[in-house]
Image (cartoon, rainbow, N blue to C red):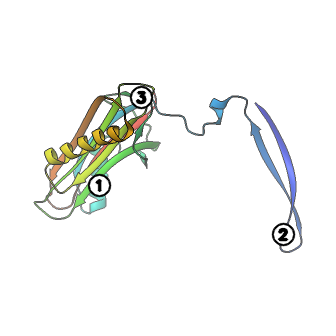
Amino acid sequence: MNVFRRSITIRTFSDQYHQIIFSFIYVTELSYMNMVSTPNIFCLVKGAGEGRTLLNAFDQALLTAGVGDTNLVRMSSIVPPGAKQRKSITLPKGGLIPVAYAHIDSGKPGEVISAAIAVALPEDPDLAGVIMEYEAKAPLAEVEEIVRQMAQDAFEYRNRKLGALFSTGVEHTVESCAAVFAGAVLWYE
């Protein structure tokens, strides 16, 4: 890796001159140019929680799902080519974690809330997969059926052959303030 510095002079509004030093890093290999590497594994997670407030309920749902001590970075819904499903993933506490997710909350006692996630993978491992999320004030069976159909539709639009379809979800009857969460965490092996 070659590193060099270059200085330029900038004229400000006060007619003073300031010298600014810029550092540039030249990279000889394309792989170094990626600011974030592409995840190669994914894990489906889910959780429900009650709390004093809706935000506390959401936090409890994240803890139940196993992602409560991380910083979730919500992303669009694409699984990188060749990514493999894992039953569980160990995540760094405080880490920036890429995730596609569905969530819903409610403060209406007795209301049923559900969130579900579906991951569709292609027959061809060189193609990307799709993640779909759905949440509603409805039973889980209905919500999961819809999200699975959404994933199948996404493959149809892309003219890809479906190789595998995974889904998970969570249903909860609100006691006071509740939230549900279902996500597809992307990570590295």
- Rendering quarter of residue 83: top left
Crowd around label 2: few <14 · some 14–19 · many ≥20 (10 Å): few
Amino acid of disc 1: Phe
State whether residue 21 is above or below residue 85: below
Quadrant for the C terminus, please: top left
**Residue 12: which disc?**
2
Residue 2 % position (x, y) = 79, 32
Residue 118 % position (x, y) = 28, 39
Of the numbered discs 1 and 2, the one sitting upstream in the chain is 2
Q: Are marks 2 and 3 in contact (CB under 8 Å)?
A: no
**Of residues 9 and 135, which is closer to you in this image?**
135
Tell me if I can see residue 160 in this picture: yes
State whether residue 119 is above or below residue 177: above
Q: Which residue is mark 1?
A: 58
The residue that appears at 24% across and 62% down in the rendered structure is 52
1 vs 3, front mark: 3
**Residue 83: which disc?**
3
| C-alpha separation, residue under disc 1 versus residue under disc 3 | 28 Å
Q: How many marks?
A: 3
The residue that appears at 32% across and 34% down in the rendered structure is 120
Residue 86 % position (x, y) = 34, 28
